[in-house]
Amino acid sequence: MASIQVRLPSLLEPITGTRSLTVDAPTASEAIEALLEAQPGLRVHLYDERRNLRPHVRLFWNDGDFAWIDDGVAAHDGDVLTVMQAVSGG
Amino acid sequence: MVVAVGTEKGAWFFDPDERQLEGPVLPGWKVTAFTDTAADDYLLATGSNWFGASIHRSPDLTNWAQTENSPSWPEGGDRSLTQIWTFARNAGRIYAGVDQAGLFTSDDSGSSWQPVDGINEHHTRPAWQPGFGGLALHSILIDPDNADRIWIGISAVGVFRSEDGGSTWTTANSGVAKAAADEQFDDIGYCVHKIQLDPDDANRLYRQDHRGVYRSPDGGRTWESTENGLPSSFGFPMVMDRSSKTLFIVPLTSDEQRLPVGGEFRVYRSTNRSDSWEVSGTGHPAAATYTQVLRGAMDTNDNGTVAYGTTAGTLGLTLDAGESWETMPWTLPRILSVSFLPD
């Protein structure tokens, strides 16, 4: 079991009361489940009714998009799970 | 009473007498609807271009926390809940109207929500098509003398009426011009924008529609056009102040332009149950003003005070049922919802 740092965007702070928390999980995918268990109010904001990640939300595992890593990758102390919202400029 | 203002980027509150603005609450979130509850607290609905819709509760309009449950469609299904458009309260029951179109009720002040299958699974539903603003169930009316009589409005679909507390629903659009005909069902395809009940007779309804302004003498079974005095029949909000028995609307040039006619932003009113309409009093912007009021962004305390918020973030207020209007000094983000709440 590893200790994983979770970082959240400011828009979600009213839901969680914090932008930073720690969860314990053995793998990357289980870190997400641990986050949703610790903060169940996040689920509706991250996933749609088909349990798909909302289209303008991205999850990063350290420096890589979660979509491109193996869900079962082992977690290590100090790994970082980051929730990001897509922001466009102009 | 407090005026609650929901915008594209948070909520603000002000007392219409003291004119002190409080907020923002939930900055960055769309705030789309408000209600008070039988538990003497408040709910507001949030939305987001990223994070979906939910409900927050407050005991004091200052401290807010997301509720554990919100109206929702079943997981794994083909419907998405994209926005909570409106709340309506009748004693201990709260109704929520949502996009994709649906009606939900809560009998525990918003702690849990149940779908109203009679309308959500209506036999015409497979043919419902969204309007420009989505497939929104945005208007809910309840007969104050008979809670079993309910009307709802869905954009680009029409008005539905229930006489049995929501178990069964019939369409209520006869006499209204269609926005988009459906090949299978002749009684849908009406783009209602807002509906109101008469304060003295719940068989009389009023309607701002995409295709005109109407009233019904028979609970919504039939409708007649009532546009005498209006510069345009297109618009979104419609409010009935129950004390003065005055209707208020904000006409716009057309569905293509959606601008005040000639740049003259004016609230219109009818004091004779929609027989005729006139510019409502004094105090409208003197200079060209090309902004609009969305359907949820005008409300009344039912005692002569009416407030509206514009897409330019300005707020208008009358304390005398539309004899005179004032523009508030603040400029907020695009205003989506305005509601009077007890303080």
Image (spheres, coloured by chain):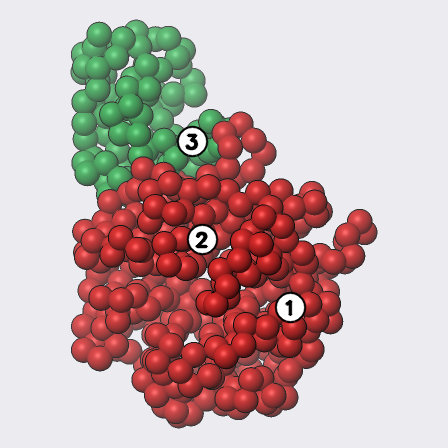
Chain colours: A green, B red
Q: Which residue is drawn at 18% across and 72% down?
A: B20
- Residue at 42% x, 31% y: name it: A47
Subunit of mark 3? A
Local SS, label 2? strand
Mark number, residue B126: none
Contact between marks 3 and 2 (CB within 8 A): the answer is no
**Earlier-in-chain disc, 2 versus 1:** 2
Could you say which disc has been placed on residue B220 in the image?
1
> B41 or B137, which lies in front?
B41
What's the CA distance linking mark 3 and mark 1?
Answer: 39 Å
Q: Which mark is on residue A47?
A: 3
> Which of the labelled discs sits on residue B95, or is there none?
2
Residue B232 percent across, percent down from the top left: 61, 81
| Kind of residue at disc 2 | Tyr
* Mark 2 surroundings: few (<14), some (14-19) or many (≥20) residues within 10 A: many
| Residue A89 visible in the picture | no
Left or right: B203 with respect to B8? right
Q: Give, as a three-letter code, the residue at label 1.
A: Gly
Nearer the observer: mark 3 or 2; the answer is 2
Q: Is mark 1 on a helix, strand or loop?
A: loop
**Residues at badges 2 and 1 in contact (C-beta under 8 Å)?**
no
Q: What element carries label 3?
A: loop
Quarter of the image for residue A79 reads top left
Identified by mark 3, the residue type is: Tyr
Cα gap from disc 2 to disc 1, whole angstroms: 20 Å
